[in-house]
């Protein structure tokens, strides 16, 4: 049976799972051996789930061969083979942050395009680290969007976490500078820096990220220890160009994938794992502070394919 956290992940990934299941259902549903048309349908479902065209074609071709050679004889065999294939593709994207020891404060810079969930993920991370007994501070470096500072401060109040902020329109790098000094002075374990949403075509804002990083490095050359790009799973294949675009301005160390609860495009994690040497740090499965999961490939595949072994 699923453990508690796995079963809640199972519920949250329902849309992507239904999508895949409808592709799988035909294959052995009629009790006869699957036909080519059934595989074409599965291929379409995999592409709709945003695994990417290449991976979708490869997966179907390999399943088709195994059915022909009688290595796959039933719906269960098929599901097991698909799970194995997905797991192989996703395993490289795992990286645990429990290796989060060493110097403090650990500094995490959150970046991404507009509205993907950076601020919410910042709050969820704060909550998670707090639950591990860590002292967490937040920095309100989105000085660009009206009300962004208040949004982070509300999270700070709710979680009882200090938020370093200046007024709307002030220099984001100056806020980051203050925050790191304050986090050091107050012996924080983790400093999470929220930043403004930005598009790669807005070169000024993109270059501002470089400035934030430079200012942090002046205080401590090892910071920021992490730069995580938040991406919205619902954006599908577009997230791949977001990763490329941000990589030109900052050195990313991982991605956080949000809104997996609201989309049938959860397969995007496969596309990310195949195309980039970039770990998936966390996945967001809702709007609340507890709706964050560490990315564990096995749990993810089990939840997607409705497997319980
Ligand atoms: N369903 C769902 N909603 C989410 C998730 N993460 C964030 N959201 C919602 O997405 C919306 C935008 O979230 P924010 O955290 O403000 O996004 P942001 O990237 O900080 O936005 P900007 O600062 O404007 O660029 C909010 O309504 C969040 O509640 C998630 O994992 N699941
Ligand atoms: Mg924000």
Image (cartoon, rainbow, N blue to C red):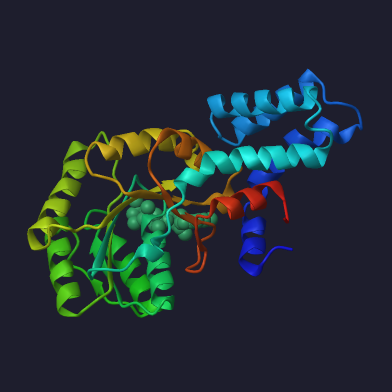
**As drawn, is 210 to the left or to the right of 196?**
left
**As drawn, is 213 to the left or to the right of 272?**
left
In front of the other: 282 or 121:
282
Tell me residue 139's x, y (percent).
24, 66
In front of the other: 145 or 98:
98
Q: Which quadrant is home to the N terminus? A: bottom right
Q: Residue furthest top?
A: 36
- Residue plotted at (27% across, 64% down): 149
- Residue plotted at (79% across, 32% down): 72
- Residue plotted at (60% across, 55% down): 299
Q: Ligand 1 quadrant? A: bottom left
Q: Is residue 163 above or below residue 239?
A: below
**As drawn, is 307 to the left or to the right of 106?**
right
Q: Which quadrant is home to the C terminus? A: bottom right
Taking the image as drawn, is residue 105 in sight? yes
Tell me residue 233's x, y (percent).
50, 44
């Amino acid at each position: 049976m699923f453990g508690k956290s796995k079963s809640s992940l199972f519920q949250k990934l329902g849309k992507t799972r239904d999508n895949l299941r409808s592709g799988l259902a035909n294959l052995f549903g009629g009790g006869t051996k699957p036909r080519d048309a059934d595989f074409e349908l599965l291929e379409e479902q995999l592409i709709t789930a945003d695994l990417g065209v290449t991976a979708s074609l490869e997966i179907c071709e390999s399943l088709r061969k195994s059915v022909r050679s009688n290595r796959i004889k039933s719906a269960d065999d098929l599901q097991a083979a698909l799970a194995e294939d997905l797991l192989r593709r996703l395993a490289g994207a795992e990286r645990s942050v429990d290796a989060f020891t060493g110097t403090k404060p650990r500094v995490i810079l959150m970046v991404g395009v507009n509205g993907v969930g950076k601020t919410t993920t910042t709050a969820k991370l704060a909550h998670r680290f707090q639950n591990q007994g860590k002292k967490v501070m937040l920095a309100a470096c989105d000085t660009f969007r009206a009300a962004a500072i208040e949004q982070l401060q509300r999270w700070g109040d709710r979680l009882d976490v200090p938020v370093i902020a200046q007024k709307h329109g002030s220099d984001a790098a100056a806020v980051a500078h203050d925050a790191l000094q304050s986090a050091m002075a107050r012996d924080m374990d983790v400093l999470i820096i929220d930043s403004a949403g930005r598009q790669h075509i807005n070169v000024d804002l993109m270059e501002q990220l470089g400035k934030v990083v430079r200012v942090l490095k002046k205080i401590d050359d090892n910071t920021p220890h992490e730069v995580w790009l938040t991406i919205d799973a619902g954006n599908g294949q577009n997230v791949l160009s977001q990763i490329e675009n941000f990589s030109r301005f900052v050195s990313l160390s991982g991605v956080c994938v949000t809104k997996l609860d609201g989309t049938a495009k959860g397969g995007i994690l496969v596309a990310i794992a195949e195309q980039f040497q970039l770990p998936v740090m966390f996945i967001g499965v809702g709007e609340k502070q507890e709706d964050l999961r560490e990315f564990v490939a096995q749990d993810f595949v089990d939840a997607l394919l409705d497997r319980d072994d």
